Image: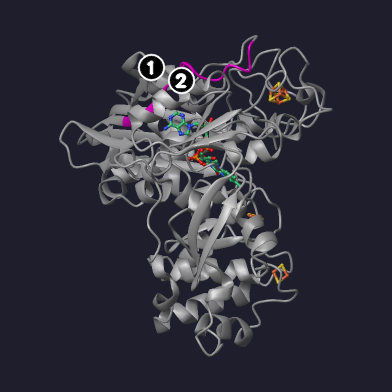
Amino acid sequence: MRAFTYTEPGTVTEAVAALAAAGPGARFLAGGTTLYDLMKLGVEAPAAVVDVHRIAGLATIDTSGPAELVFGGGARMADVAEDPVLLRDYPALAESLAKAASQQLRTMATVGGNLLQRTRCAYFRGGRPFACNKREPGSGCAAREGLDRGHAVLGISDACIATYPGDWAIALIAFDAVVDVLGPAGERTVPLAQLHVEPGEHPEREHTLAPGELILRIRVPTTGTGRGSTYHKIRDRESYAFALTSAAAAVALDADGTVTDARLALGGVATVPWRAAEAERSLVGQPLSPDASRRAGEIVFADAVVGTSNGYKIELGIRTVVDALRIAGERATQ
Amino acid sequence: MAVPNQAVPTTVAGSVPAAFQVNDRLVELDLDPRESLLDVLRERLGMTGTKKGCDHGQCGACTVHIDGRRVVSCLTPAVQVRGTTVTTIEGVAGPDRELHPLQQAFIDNDALQCGYCTPGQIMSGLACIAEGHADTDDRAREYLSGNLCRCGAYEGIIAAVRGCSAQGTAEEVSG
Ligand SMILES: Cc1cc2nc3c(=O)[nH]c(=O)nc-3n(C[C@H](O)[C@H](O)[C@H](O)COP(=O)(O)OP(=O)(O)OC[C@H]3O[C@@H](n4cnc5c(N)ncnc54)[C@H](O)[C@@H]3O)c2cc1C
Ligand code: SF4
Ligand code: FES
Ligand code: FES
């Protein structure tokens, strides 16, 4: 591992200043479960690391307000997953965390760092001699001719087909979350839907944060639709694995069972957290039937492009949507 | 916790002075910021009870507690434990070396074969009980899924943790 300068500032303002002072290639370190892991693999090699994992105030969780739920960027996944308001009123948010990683990792990992976790593509993690445009721009993409069973079918480009691996961002994007960040130029707010970028010709660029911007908090507008929600995650084994396909689904129903509000986002199948707006619109104003749910799933995958071994993700993804909407519908009527 | 919290502004290239507690021992070391807690425990403190399986957060063999919460020590940069109390498998038995009830339950339930995953299973099991996640078989399985056992001793492991949970015997170590 490349040697680096280690700094542990006491406040967020000091952290932003320390990162700016450290120059290009410096990184914030939170739980380290992505960054330190990739540093061990030599895939990340920052010259300076600014540790934010115990900055007071960065880990605050406040779900008591009438207008929004607030999660400090440094809050631990394990703590947010057990928040009583989330468990009762937004099960999709709680489940997206509880079904991610393992409890040991969730007590370390932060909900801010989680958003910026990097792909599990084996060629990206494996380092040289594998070609990888994300790790080494212009070198090619080994997954194209290689093992692509876990790779994306939506939002891909010629340069990269790596899946966005996280679960939390999938549930957040369905609930219109925004992210407050602090940088050298001050504070600004980024809608989660504009945080991640598809690979295009530059897969090395994964998000729209400027270098040195610190995620202060994630905010989610409150909504009654949260009660009828689920995060449905299909894995190779029942627990402790990344999603093959997943769906965050939420519905509100009127007294006749007609859908008045629908939220749908998918994980495991796309290069970025994938909000399925057109599929959502197809559900509103209709009864929540298996046929309508299946049609919504088909809309999501209408433009999917498959590779050698990931074609199964289309049918599995559609069925994941159908199951997720069924669970959400049951919860909405309880 | 006897150690002062050192989360004060520090900028260090090369070596970071650190003080932390490991079980009942106060440790003072200069750390290279690249070192993992796992390597510090095993290579610098000679505490080889904590095992290295994958070194990438995937197997749970290296599980320890920091201030009572379970973590994987392979993905914990050692500099992050300054000022904390680390509990390892060596700190689980009683003062006269009598086995902790969960250790005894592993023996009684045949919860190991080669034993390589066992220190991690026990540290995870203790935390699982203390967190309240061992109240049903399904929940215990879910919350122990971060600990892989190549020998497949899962049935015994779940039986040991569930049995101990029912007796309420884990709290005494989670510190
Ligand atoms: C074995 C294993 C299994 C996993 N399984 C899953 C899974 O099933 N589902 C899932 O969703 N995730 C999974 N993960 C990923 C894990 O959830 C993420 O690694 C974790 O959430 C990242 O958070 P962290 O605090 O550890 O971030 P770090 O590793 O510390 O940081 C990650 C990145 O975010 C940046 N960063 C961190 N905090 C901030 C901040 N406040 N502001 C700006 N930038 C910041 C860092 O600079 C770095 O680039 C798994 C990880 C492992 C090792
Ligand atoms: S899919 Fe993306 S991350 Fe994987 S090898 Fe190709 S360019 Fe790299
Ligand atoms: S050695 Fe740490 S999880 Fe495998
Ligand atoms: S007892 Fe051998 S790995 Fe678990």
Chain letter of disc 1 in the image: A
Please name the predominant secondary structure of the magenta segment in the image. Answer: loop
User: In the drawing, what numbered circle is on residue A261?
Assistant: none
- At a point 61% along the width and 28% down the height, the residue shown is A46
Occupied quadrant, residue B155: bottom right
Q: Calculate the distance from the C-alpha at mark 1 to the C-alpha at mark 2.
A: 7 Å
Three-letter code for the amino acid on which mark 1 is drawn = Pro
**Which of pointers 1 and 2 lies earlier in the amino acid sequence?**
2
- Give the crowd class for mark 2: few <14, some 14-19, many >=20 residues within 10 Å: some
Asked if labels 2 and 1 touch by Cβ distance under 8 angstroms, the answer is yes
Residue B2 seen in render: yes
Three-letter code for the amino acid on which mark 2 is drawn = Ala
Query: Along the horizontal axis of the image, is B129 left or right of A120?
Result: left
Q: Position of residue A279 (x, y in %)?
A: 43, 22
Residue of label 2: A20
Residue of label 1: A184
What's drawn in magenta, residue-wise? A202-218
- At a point 44% along the width and 58% down the height, the residue shown is B84
Q: Nearer the viewer, residue B97 or A166?
A: B97
Q: Position of residue A209 (x, y in %)?
A: 45, 18
Asked if residue A318 lies in the magenta stretch, the reply is no
User: What colouring style does the render use?
Assistant: one colour
Asked if residue A210 lies in the magenta stretch, the reply is yes
Chain letter of disc 2 in the image: A
Q: Nearer the viewer, residue B171 or B49?
A: B49
Does dot 1 land on a helix, a strand or a loop? loop
Occupied quadrant, residue A164: top right
- At a point 62% along the width and 19% down the height, the residue shown is A304
